Image (tube, rainbow, N blue to C red):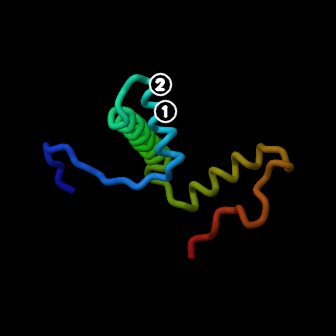
Amino acid sequence: MAITRKPAQLPLRLPRELHADIQQLAEDQGVSMNQFLLYVVTSKVSEMKQSKEFFAKRIAGRTRQQSAEGLKKILDKVSPASRIVKGDEVPDET
């Protein structure tokens, strides 16, 4: 995806209640809705990228089976009341 120097515009449909919340929060902060949304979206995107990078490093070089075995070792240390219930287990790769 090519990045342009011109700021992108994104028409966005929002529920009225969410729009009102954003408007109020922006007013509370003393900024425009555009500035407020830019901050919120930037913060969330940064958080999601960091999470993605963290988990990519944690599982680097491991197969799904190895990851499942590692999870099982952790869960074996947890009390039986907290164990994974039927239907929540990691599916077999087939």
- Mark sitting on residue 40: none
Q: Secondary structure at mark 1?
A: helix
Height in image: 77 above or below 27? below
Height in image: 8 above or below 91? above
Image point (63%, 68%), residue name? 91
Image point (40%, 23%), residue name? 30
**Labels 2 and 1 touching (C-beta < 8 A):** yes
x and y percentages locating residue 49 in the rendered image: 40, 43
Q: Mark 1 belongs to which amino acid?
A: Gln
Q: Nearer the viewer, residue 12 or 24?
A: 24
Among all residues in the image, which is located at the extreme right? 81
Q: Quadrant of the C terminus?
A: bottom right
Image point (79%, 60%), residue name? 85
Residue 69 located left or right of residue 85: left
Q: Which residue is mark 1?
A: 24
Image point (43%, 40%), residue name? 44
Q: Mark 2 belongs to which amino acid?
A: Asp
Q: Nearer the viewer, residue 32 or 77?
A: 32
Height in image: 30 above or below 14? above
Q: Secondary structure at mark 2?
A: helix
Question: Callout 2: few (<14), some (14-19), or many (20+) C-alpha neighbours within 10 Å?
Answer: few
x and y percentages locating residue 72 in the rendered image: 69, 53
Q: Quadrant of the N terminus?
A: bottom left
Which image quarter: residue 84?
bottom right
Q: Nearer the viewer, residue 79 or 6?
A: 6
Q: Nearer the viewer, residue 28 or 77?
A: 28
x and y percentages locating residue 82 in the rendered image: 81, 48
Mark 2 and mark 1: Cα distance apart in space = 6 Å
- Mark sitting on residue 28: 2
